[in-house]
Each structure stands twice: as C-alpha cells, then as structure tokens.
Image (spheres, rainbow, N blue to C red):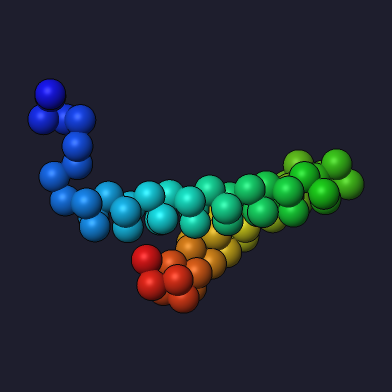
Amino acid sequence: MNNLDFPLIWSYNYIMMNEREIKTWIEEASSEFYWNFRDDLDDLSAELMKEELDKLESRMFFIIKNSFGA
C-alpha cells in the first residue's frame, strides 16, 4: 500500500471536501444567474456584473461555510 492511498488527517480532508462542494455549488448558481442576463447586456455591463458576482461568491462562500460549520 502506498502512503498516498489514505489521507493522513481524515477530519481535515472531510472539511476540505465540504469546502470544495460549497464553492462548486455557489459557482454553479452564480454562473446560471450570469448567463440568464448575459445575452441582454453589452460587454461593459456584463463585465461589471461578473465582477460583482465574483465578490458575491466570496461573501456567500464565507456565509454558507460558517452556516454549515465546515
């Protein structure tokens, strides 16, 4: 058996898995929101919306992560 087959710290890997899942969940929701409006926006407006959504993703990740106790 290779040492890399099993994580050294189980709880740490469990927490990291949850954080990845939370991040993916938020990114998918943000992307869906973006594409619902993107075609109706000019390029500048779309870029501004993307910047704001990136900020919102960070805030939502913090809120949801702490809510789940990850």
Residue extending farthest front: 1
Answer above or below: position of 14 versus 38: below
Quarter of the image holding residue 15?
A: bottom left
The quadrant of the picture occupied by the C terminus is bottom left
Picture coordinates of residue 64 (x, y %)?
A: 50, 69
Residue extending farthest top: 1
* Left or right of residue 25: residue 14: left
* Left or right of residue 13: residue 2: left
Picture coordinates of residue 34 (x, y %)?
A: 73, 50
Residue in the picture at 43% in, 49% down? 20
Residue in the picture at 19% in, 41% down? 7
Residue extending farthest right: 40
* Left or right of residue 15: residue 67: right
Question: Quick one: 33 or 55, which is closer to the camera?
Answer: 33
Q: How many marks?
A: 0
In the rendered image, is residue 44 in sight? yes
* Left or right of residue 36: residue 49: left
Answer above or below: position of 59 versus 24: below
Residue in the picture at 63% in, 48% down? 28
Picture coordinates of residue 58 (x, y %)?
A: 48, 61
In the rendered image, is residue 59 in sight? no
Picture coordinates of residue 6 (x, y %)?
A: 19, 37
Question: Quick one: 23 or 47, which is closer to the camera?
Answer: 23
Question: Quick one: 57 or 15, which is closer to the camera?
Answer: 15
The quadrant of the picture occupied by the N terminus is top left
